[in-house]
């Protein structure tokens, strides 16, 4: 049976976890806002510089060269922005995952202790029911570990795919820019 102190300790732990996760979420939002402000300032500065350069163009060929020269840096900056945004999101996600895993592990330990305590105090003749309960707890723990491993693998594959797509896009833009300059 749970005591009042145990219930209060559990509530306190849950509240601390909730506030910790809320703070992590706000930190992620702050990082995204900071990233967007930095990107916006850089874009505004570059737009101003580009407008000044456009005003000094003397012919159509110079204009085409100027325009093609802007494609590669734009693609690289877009890829860098996306990568930074992805890093912020995965960092925040990792914090949430770590917290959930810790809470789950703690809940599993408490439940296993509860089952063990119930087994010790079980009436004679209930050994088979206790064995079934212990087997179910063990199976649930194994299933949870399998799910966590699968999620980790899926996350790793998604990150590898994101990196490959970003690299391919950047390389394609570099090739297109090089081809445009040769014309």
Image: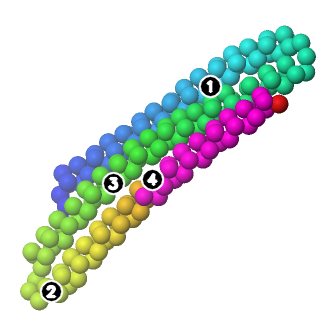
Q: Is residue 60 left or right of residue 17?
A: right
As measured in the structure, the alpha-carbon distance from the residue carrying label 4 to the one carrying label 1 is: 27 Å
Mark 4 highlights which residue?
156
Q: Is residue 128 left or right of residue 179?
A: left
Residue 98, compared with residue 63, is above or below; it is below
Q: Nearer the viewer, mark 4 or mark 2?
A: 4
Specify start and end residues of the magenta stretch as a single range.
153-182
Q: Nearer the viewer, mark 1 or mark 2?
A: 1
Q: Residue furthest right?
A: 59
63 or 46, nearer to the observer: 63
Q: Quadrant of residue 169?
A: top right
The reply to whether discs 4 and 2 touch (Cβ–Cβ < 8 Å) is no
Q: Is residue 159 left or right of residue 146?
A: right
**Residue 145: x, y in percent?**
32, 64
Q: Quadrant of residue 127?
A: bottom left
Q: Residue furthest front?
A: 182
Q: Residues within 10 Å of mark 1 (few under 14, many from 20)?
A: some
Magenta stretch encompasses residue 176? yes
> Could you say which disc has been placed on residue 39 in the image?
1
Mark 3 highlights which residue?
101
As measured in the structure, the alpha-carbon distance from the residue carrying label 3 to the one carrying label 2 is: 33 Å
As measured in the structure, the alpha-carbon distance from the residue carrying label 4 to the one carrying label 2 is: 45 Å
């Amino acid at each position: 049976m749970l005591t009042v102190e145990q219930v209060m300790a559990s509530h306190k732990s849950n509240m601390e976890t909730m506030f910790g996760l809320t703070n992590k979420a706000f930190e992620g939002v702050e990082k995204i806002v900071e990233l967007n402000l930095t990107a916006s300032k850089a874009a505004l500065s570059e737009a101003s510089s580009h407008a000044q350069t456009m005003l000094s163009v003397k012919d159509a060929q110079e204009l085409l060269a100027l325009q093609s020269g802007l494609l590669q840096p734009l693609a690289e900056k877009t890829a860098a922005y996306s990568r930074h945004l992805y890093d912020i999101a995965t960092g925040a996600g990792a914090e949430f995952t770590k917290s959930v895993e810790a809470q789950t592990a703690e809940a599993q330990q408490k439940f296993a202790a509860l089952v063990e305590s119930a087994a010790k105090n079980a009436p004679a003749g209930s050994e088979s029911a206790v064995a079934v309960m212990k087997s179910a707890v063990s199976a649930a723990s194994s299933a949870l570990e399998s799910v966590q491993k699968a999620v980790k693998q899926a996350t790793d594959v998604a990150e590898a795919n994101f990196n490959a797509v970003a690299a391919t896009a950047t390389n394609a833009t570099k090739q297109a820019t090089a081809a445009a300059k040769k014309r």
